[in-house]
Image (spheres, rainbow, N blue to C red):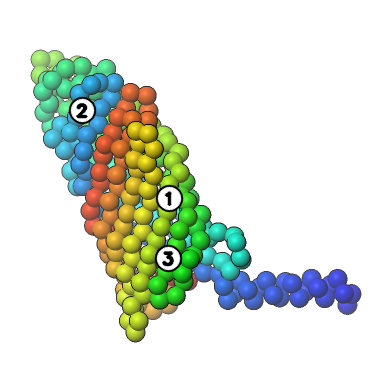
């Protein structure tokens, strides 16, 4: 066996052992029960209330997170995430304006479909009983708000839909305390950014119980805040989505 082959086999063995000892991660799949609150406007000086005008109320949607951690120095760890926020509402409005719908009285149907995709690069500052992570999240927002109003004195519907996308960098942080001699951990995790007329943040506060083989259940409270005049031309939003969530977790 040549020296080159010996070096190659040695490097392969060392890398395999390192990955076996140091690679790890976590997968989380849950349900987020969120209530809306706030205002939005589209090409109008007047704002509409998400609950009172659009009739949105509590909904349940899926949330997903996955972490991959490795032992390679200076190379950040990776987290990906997905959250879906959907709302539908019906009601009656007076002097309602939204885009091309101007100062109308009638019956309203509306919906929100908002998908958030996260890619986070982070470092583990502590990884013992106390875990602290910090990094940068790149969040892609893809959504639309669909509004239909049927005036009281007409059978003709007035319809307006606005779609928006945005790519937002955010600061990321996570704190977890693993309670000694138990299978319980406490965690706080969140993202934040503010600039010009935009402020985005979200956070989770949770408790986890791990059963066996790294499988556990996590329950907590989550809040998402979107405040921006820069989502789409003419669209201004100051919206909150808050409520409890429960997730099935596998730590490997």
> Distance between the Cα atoms at labels 2 and 1?
30 Å
* Name of the residue lying farthest toward the right: 2
* Name of the residue lying farthest toward the bottom: 181
Point out the image quarter for the N terminus: bottom right
**Residue 22 image-quadrant placement:** bottom right
Q: Nearer the viewer, residue 156 or 59?
A: 59
Residue 47 percent across, percent down from the top left = 20, 28
Label 2 element class: loop
| x 21%, y 47%: residue | 35
| x 36%, y 75%: residue | 178
| x 58%, y 69%: residue | 71
Label 3 element class: strand
> Distance between the Cα atoms at labels 2 and 3?
40 Å
Report the mark closest to the observer, 2 or 1. Answer: 1
> Which mark, residue 132?
3
Q: Is residue 143 left or right of residue 46?
A: right
Residue 119 percent across, percent down from the top left = 48, 50
Q: Is residue 104 left or right of residue 199?
A: left
Say if 17 sits above or below 51 in the image: below
Q: Nearer the viewer, residue 141 or 108?
A: 141
Lower position in the chain sequence, tag 1 or tag 3: 3
Label 1 element class: strand
> Which mark, residue 56?
none
Q: Which residue is mark 1?
A: 171
How crowded pointer 3 is (Cα within 10 Å; few <14, some 14-19, many 20+) is rated as some
Residue 164 percent across, percent down from the top left = 38, 32
> Distance between the Cα atoms at labels 1 and 3?
14 Å
Residue 79 seen in the figure:
no
Residue 206 percent across, percent down from the top left = 29, 64
| x 81%, y 73%: residue | 7
> Which mark, residue 47?
2
Say if 32 sits above or below 144 in the image: below
């Amino acid at each position: 066996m040549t020296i080159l082959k010996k070096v190659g086999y040695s490097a392969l063995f060392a890398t395999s052992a390192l990955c076996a000892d140091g690679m790890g991660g976590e997968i989380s799949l849950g349900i987020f029960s969120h209530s809306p609150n706030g205002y939005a406007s589209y090409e109008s000086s007047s704002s509409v209330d998400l609950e009172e005008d659009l009739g949105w109320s509590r909904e349940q949607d899926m949330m997903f997170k996955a972490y991959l951690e490795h032992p390679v120095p200076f190379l950040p760890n990776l987290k990906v995430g997905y959250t879906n926020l959907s709302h539908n509402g019906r009601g009656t409005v007076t002097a309602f304006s939204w885009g091309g719908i101007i100062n109308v009285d009638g019956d309203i149907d509306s919906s929100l479909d908002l998908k958030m995709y996260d890619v986070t690069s982070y470092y583990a500052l502590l990884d013992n009983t106390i875990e602290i992570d910090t990094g940068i999240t790149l969040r892609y927002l893809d959504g639309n708000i669909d509004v239909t109003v049927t005036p009281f004195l007409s059978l003709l519907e007035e319809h307006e839909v606005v779609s928006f996308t945005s790519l937002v960098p955010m600061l990321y942080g996570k704190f977890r305390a693993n309670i000694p001699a138990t299978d319980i951990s406490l965690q706080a995790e969140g993202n934040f950014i503010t600039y010009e007329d935009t402020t985005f943040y979200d956070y989770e506060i949770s408790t986890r119980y791990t059963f066996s083989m790294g499988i556990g259940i996590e329950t907590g409270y989550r809040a998402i805040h979107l405040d921006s005049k820069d989502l789409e031309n003419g669209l201004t939003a100051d919206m909150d989505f808050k409520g409890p969530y429960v997730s099935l977790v596998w730590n490997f």
